[in-house]
Amino acid sequence: MAVFIPEEPYEGTKSEAEAEFFYRLKRELDLEDAYVFHSVKLPAHSKKIFGEADFIIVCRKGVVCLEVKGGSVSYKNGIWEYADRYGNIKDQHKNPFKQADDNIIELRNVIKDTYGIDGPHIFAHGVVFPDIHFEISTVEYDPRLVCDLGTDDINAYINGLFEFERGKKPFTRDLRDKELSDTVRSLRRDFTFVETLSTRLEKSEKRIIRLTNEQAKKLEELSENEHIAIKGGAGTGKTVLAEEYAKKAAKEGKKVYFIAYNKNLVRSVKQHLAEYKNIEIFNIHAFFDKKILAFDKEKAAELKGKYYDTYWPEQCSDILSLKTAEELEEMAADVLIIDEAQDILNTNYILVMDMMLKGGFSKGRWAIFYDARQNIYNKRFEEGMSLMRGYGAAFLTLGTNCRNTKNIASYNSAVTDTELLELNDNSAGDEIEFLGYSDISGLKKHIDSIITLWNKEGVDKSNVVFLSPVVPDKSDLSKITGGKLELNILNDSYVPQKNVPVYSTIHAFKGLDSPIAVLVDADKIYPKQYKNLLYTAISRAKSKLYIIAENETLEKLKRG
């Protein structure tokens, strides 16, 4: 079976014919030890830039470069003219056979000059016209170079290209093991493909921002109901949908309160909704502080957890109960949206928010978004949900993971015993990398190695988050001296820094995501929260996940 790099057609491919030919090769190609590279450009250090080679196939018999020309083709007075499938003439007069020939010559020169890979090998070329029967007669090409609508056997065609070149150069031979691997490695390493890590990250970013069809349907249902409860696993787009619902209400002229638990998630939502002046966005405690009763630092130190769970919300309820109807009307919102509701909904908090919504939960307009599996803080969530059910909510479920690649989602499901949801993008994505160490020097070696790789592949390291169950000074990363690691700590004074990775506790990163996530200190996860925290951490990674742990812990994580 051939290896395709990338696994799917290059996302920037504008030619439908080229994409279709990609899948034909994937279905039919059966050459020994074949590698198929799609959408190839020579590296910047090339002596000559020839543009883009549509396909390069490397196998035992040699290397072949293919140009694909979709639509119709005409040739008159030495001029080639192309039209797309809709009859639109393209202003392009290049001889496709010369293009393919120039490409393979330049490819051979670069491989030879740069890597010293040379020998009596076959470098062949051909042109594919998938939409037509190619019947143009000209001395500029040999018919054996053509694959067209009438070509039934793609393997016979490719083998014929090699035989055609072998007939001109009888002393050629097949590639030996090292020659084959060196040629493939040179193409993997220095030619530009969509599947560099940096471009994969761009693709995943576009995927998470785009609403899925399922989400769009749920948004319509939201519009038809006054009381909505949306349940969804990690990566199903709850926050994206909550933001879209907030925008819709704001455009209707409504006063909107958007409440979440995580301060860092709130910071992100504020950036996304900055243009909407009638949407006020708070984490739950800032909501109490700014709208009802100022935070009492001394009392909080005295009462500790009870201050947040009981004392503060009860004091807020008492204050609101003394307000007149007119005062409450002035304070309250037309629409209340609660994201991360699993961390917020308990009886005390619900009573406060009920008075800050016009009509309350029984008659007002509200939407909550939650994932019970990500509940780390709220021991009274089920009690809160029971109360919300009494308000007659329409319960909806998001069932499509539009964040994670297949490898990340499948691993998370296996290791945390959670349901594997349908995927919006069903591509496998990168393999998860498990890196074990026995001492800090081993940890440092792994960190330096992956940073070197990121630098080489052009990754903006601000697209990386190091996730840990513990604060920075308790992490094993804090014991590394020297080396290449620089971190931007996610805290109240956090400011994004270009090309510097983020360090965050798993708790603080709930509701957020990152193209690349590196889980560290897994052995420090508190046993009672182990699977919930692991589930939250793994699901933060959109395209690439590294797990770096002490050897014993790593073996457990590998087994799931």
Image: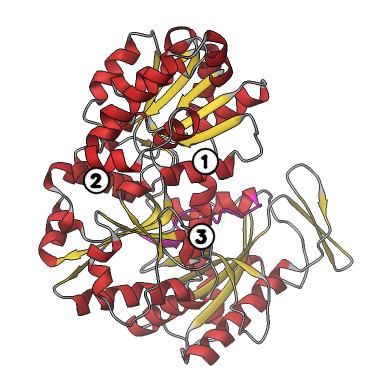
Distance of label 1 from label 2 (alpha carbons): 22 Å
Q: What element does badge 3 sit on?
A: loop
Q: Is residue 465 above or below residue 258?
A: below
Q: Is residue 203 above or below residue 2?
A: above
The three-letter code of the residue at mark 2 reads Leu
Residue 185 location (% of width, % of height): 41, 77
Distance of label 1 from label 3 (alpha carbons): 15 Å
Q: Residue at x 55, y 39 (%)?
A: 210
Q: Nearer the viewer, mark 2 or mark 3?
A: 3
For the record, the magenta segment spans 1-15
Q: Nearer the viewer, residue 25 or 318?
A: 318
Q: Is residue 150 above or below residue 423?
A: below
Q: Nearer the viewer, mark 1 or mark 2?
A: 1
Q: Residue at x 27, y 69 (%)?
A: 477
Number of other residues with Cα within 10 Å of mark 2, as a class: few under 14, some 14 to 19, many 20 or more: many
Q: Are marks 1 and 3 in contact (CB under 8 Å)?
A: no
Number of other residues with Cα within 10 Å of mark 1, as a class: few under 14, some 14 to 19, many 20 or more: many
Distance of label 2 from label 3 (alpha carbons): 24 Å
Residue 182 location (% of width, % of height): 40, 82
The three-letter code of the residue at mark 1 reads Val
Which residue position is annotated with label 3? 496
Which residue position is annotated with label 1? 269
- Asked if the magenta segment contains residue 214, the reply would be no
The three-letter code of the residue at mark 3 reads Pro
Q: Nearer the viewer, residue 171 or 522?
A: 522
Would residue 116 be visible to someone looking at this image? yes
The tag earlier along the polypeptide, 1 or 3, is 1
Q: What element does badge 2 sit on?
A: helix
Q: Quadrant of residue 544?
A: bottom left
Q: Nearer the viewer, residue 6 or 178?
A: 6
